Image (spheres, helix red, strand yellow):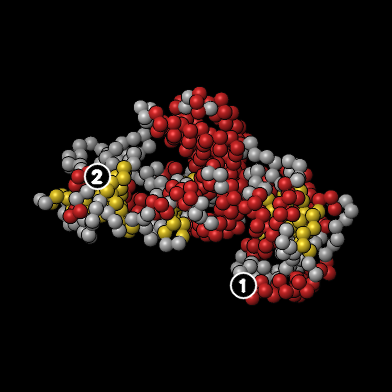
Amino acid sequence: MPTTPRSDPAGEALRPVSAAELLDPVAYPHPVARARIVETNTSLVVLTGDYAYKIKKPVRLEFLDASTLARRRLLCEEELRLNTRLAPELYLEVVPIVRAAAGIRVGAAGEAVEYAVRMRQFDGSQELSALLERGAVDASEIADLARRVARFHAAAPRDAGREGANTARMRAAVLGNLATLLAHVGGELGAPGLGKLIDWTHDVLQRAAARFRAREAAGFVRECHGDLHSRNIVRWRGRLLPFDCLEFDPALRWIDVMSDVAFLFMDLSGRARADLAAQFLDAYLDESGDYRGVALLPFYAVYRALVRAMVDALAAEKTAADERTRWVFSDRARARIHTAAGFAKPRPPPLIAMHGPSGAGKSWLSERLVPRIGAVRVRSDVERRRLAGDAPPGHDSRWDALTYARLAYCAAGCLAGGVPTIVDATFGRRADRNRLRALAAAARVPLIFLSCTADRAQLAANIAARRRRGDDPSDADLAVLDVQLAAMEPFGDDERAQVVEIASGGPDAVDRAGAAIGALPR
């Protein structure tokens, strides 16, 4: 795995740049009406209007060495490199800060006394966390974000280090976070519940050890964002952009892609937006095809929730003198622990199979069920194309067999992760329906078939409209429809207890389907 070189921190003699110097408008190479500074534990961010300048503090911590000018320059360069992968519109360059006779000058020629990352300044009210608080973000934005994250992961470098090394590092990081959290929470933060989460985490680390190593060997450990939560995502020119990738510790960003996904999934769920969490996960999986990774989603979501709980617990300690602020951080830490507990003990998820020929409205209905029941979809049209690669997907018996096997394989991973799963396919043959029944029985989850119905004229009209729009992955035409109708095997009497018929496009279709799913034994 790539590593960041370390520098000798001894004896840096340069006089630090002061806040007063950074607030001087003449220090900048562009007009500044008023500058202000936002401070974090490790950085100073100077807001100047059009641009923001992020400067590393000269600190050396357990997880961060920014003690020398050389180290701070390197960290600035890493921050620029990492963030231009996802937000090139925001991250512009690394600039030197020099000290002249008249004071500091940002981006000027001369010997640097400090370095800064120059960014385009954005409105904090457009951060995803703020948008969520106002209810000002919609599903299409979240889906667009998810697809771009999936494409980012697909293009990210893979870890080529020693086999099993990343899994060992991940295990150490998880257990280290638990130890720190346990050492800094009192009874007020629900330590008994935390004890159960610690036991659960140890159990998963042992039980899923082979799965973690298999994921690593298969190339799912990549150079990810590392800190993908709602405060590190901003709406910029109409799109949600992730920013502030984790630059200071390579081990925390060279992770399983599902750990990256789990952070935002957990954050959205913890903010009572399970609908958006489901839409984010659904769109990510539809783009990436990494349905088997969902089996590890609860583990990573618990880990991410407890990392945030640890951060809040430490903040509560630091603000102990301010009772109100301490209470805010303590309450937030409790909420994180509660969120983690929910992921550790999910209810058995339902398995929902859409049924009916092309044009029956299966995809229309399943798309609306995703946020309603917190589900993900596995679509036959998408998976058939994924199997085909660059070749045109076929519709013969061989391709059908491959596709339905792929659907069951993907659904098994989602069910193992405790996520309600919708399989969107024709399911005209009883053999394919039986495969899903066997999967539900093996996973010990309830199964329902939502059978979408319409006459042939309506089916043909829907297919024609879909082909005109060109916005659907299905390539079924009228010839394919007729083959499907001729081969459709009716449900047997022994199947009907698991079938609910839904009229295509009916005004109550979503409500009827949602009610039927809600009535399933769990």
First reached walking from the N terminus: tag 2 or tag 1: 2
Q: Which mark is residue 69?
A: 2
Instruction: Tell me if mark 2 has few (under 14), some (14-19) or many (20+) residues whose alpha carbon lies within 10 angstroms of its own.
Output: many
Position of residue 306 measured from the top left corner of the image (x, y, whole percent)? 50, 36
In the image: residue 443, left or right of residue 282:
right
Closer to the camera, 13 or 220?
13
Position of residue 490 measured from the top left corner of the image (x, y, whole percent)? 86, 61
At horizontal 59% and vertical 50% (from top left) the residue drawn is 275
Closer to the camera, 21 or 260?
21
**7, above or below 89, in the image:** above
SS type, badge 1: loop
Residue 171 seen by the camera = no
Tag 1 residue: 470
SS type, badge 2: helix
Q: Nearer the viewer, mark 2 or mark 1?
A: 1
**151, above or below 454, in the image:** above
Residues at marks 2 and 1 touching, judged by CB atoms closer than 8 Å? no
Position of residue 111 measured from the top left corner of the image (x, y, whole percent)? 17, 51
At horizontal 71% and vertical 71% (from top left) the residue drawn is 462
Residue type, numbered disc 2: Leu
